[in-house]
């Protein structure tokens, strides 16, 4: 072999070694040893479903993964997966889509709940436990001012939870029958807010407080013919106050009406009884409560100005 041929062979050998060494350095930089294959970390969401009062595991509870929720009705849709708890109340999900999801949990003789916020697909192992309260049946009649039953009234209900609670009571769609009757089959212990809605009427509102073991409840709700009052909540500089609460209190009539909340532009809308007078009461954190008189014939849009509380 002449000198030129030997030099070329040496150069080729060095090039091959350089490629191999570069590949080795790249593997080391990415934390992968050449002798070991890349292992995919297991993804699992699991936990235990228990009785909120006794702490006992709940067998055969149904857990469902949904990927959609209606922001108005809060009804879940697009079911992706479901499973049941075993004798120890244990459940496990190992398959996930690459998008956030909600979990609904239900069991016979218990309330149904779902996660208040969407859950991101777990990157590894994650534990999420649930507690369910025993179901309490609530029924009643929705009627008008002359005591006539009102049919096709939409009934919505929600459970007052702690502000930091990760779960919400799941509310099924309910309407009153021809006799004005409604039935909520699975409402657990705690404070239950019930709303009755019918076009052309005030929004009916009741709150009932129940303890574990309480008997079934009966709650009747009266609706009155309604008219809409709208307006804006502003500060003294004319700037809108978002999320201010507005409530209407009637003169000489004990009727619960729900609170409404102003939007980001400070605008609010509330339905009040026809031919009745009272006060709008507006409040917001950091501001003094303000009352505005509403007469029976008022129809103009209202402007409520709130003054800041003095700094102490």
Image (cartoon, helix red, strand yellow):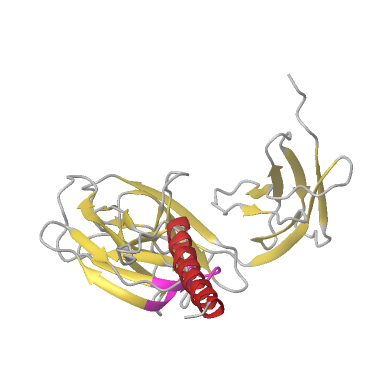
Counting from the top left corner in percent of width and height, residue 158 is at 43, 57
Counting from the top left corner in percent of width and height, residue 124 is at 35, 58
Counting from the top left corner in percent of width and height, residue 200 is at 63, 72
Instruction: State the residue lying farthest toward the top.
Output: 312
Residue 222 belongs to the span the image colors magenta = no
User: Which residue is located at x 69 percent, y 41 percent?
Assistant: 283
**Which residue is more in the foreground, 69 or 301?**
69
Left or right of 136, for residue 204: right
**Which residue is more in the foreground, 25 or 52?**
25
Whether residue 50 is visible here, answered yes or no, is yes
Whether residue 147 is visible here, answered yes or no, is no
User: Which residue is located at x 60 percent, y 63 percent?
Assistant: 202
Q: Please state the extent of the stretch shown in magenta in the rendering.
A: 66-79
Instruction: State the residue lying farthest toward the front.
Output: 2
**Which residue is more in the foreground, 293 or 58?**
58
- Name the quadrant of the C terminus: top right
**Which residue is more in the foreground, 219 or 191?**
191
Counting from the top left corner in percent of width and height, residue 117 is at 47, 58
């Amino acid at each position: 072999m002449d000198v030129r041929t030997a030099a070329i062979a040496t150069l080729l050998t060095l090039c091959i070694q350089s490629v191999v060494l570069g590949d080795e350095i790249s593997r080391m930089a990415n934390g992968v040893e050449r002798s070991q294959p890349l292992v995919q970390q297991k993804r699992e969401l699991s936990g235990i479903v228990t009785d909120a009062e006794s702490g006992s595991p709940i067998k055969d509870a149904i857990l469902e993964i949904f990927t959609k929720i209606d922001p108005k009705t809060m009804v879940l849709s697009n079911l992706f997966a479901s499973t049941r708890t075993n004798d120890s109340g244990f459940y496990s999900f190992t398959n996930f889509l690459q998008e956030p999801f909600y979990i609904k949990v239900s069991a016979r003789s218990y309330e149904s709940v779902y996660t208040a916020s969407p859950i991101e697909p777990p990157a590894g192992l994650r534990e999420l436990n649930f507690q369910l309260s025993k179901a309490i049946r609530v029924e009643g009649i929705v009627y008008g001012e002359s005591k006539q039953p009102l049919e096709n009234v939409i009934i919505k209900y929600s459970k007052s939870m702690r502000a930091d609670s990760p779960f919400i009571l799941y509310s099924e769609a309910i309407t009153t029958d021809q006799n004005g009757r409604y039935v909520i089959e699975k409402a657990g212990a705690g404070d239950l807010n019930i709303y009755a809605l019918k076009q052309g009427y005030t929004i009916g509102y009741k709150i009932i407080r129940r303890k574990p073991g309480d008997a079934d409840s009966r709650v009747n709700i009266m609706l009155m013919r309604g008219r809409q009052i709208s307006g804006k909540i502003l500060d003294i500089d004319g700037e809108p106050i978002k999320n201010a609460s507005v409530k209407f209190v009637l003169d000489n009539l004990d009727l619960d009406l729900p609170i409404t909340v102003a939007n980001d532009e400070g605008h609010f809308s509330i339905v009040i009884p026809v031919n009745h007078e009272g006060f709008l009461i507006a409040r917001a954190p950091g501001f003094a409560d303000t009352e505005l008189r509403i007469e029976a014939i008022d129809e103009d849009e209202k402007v409520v100005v709130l003054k800041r509380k003095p700094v102490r």
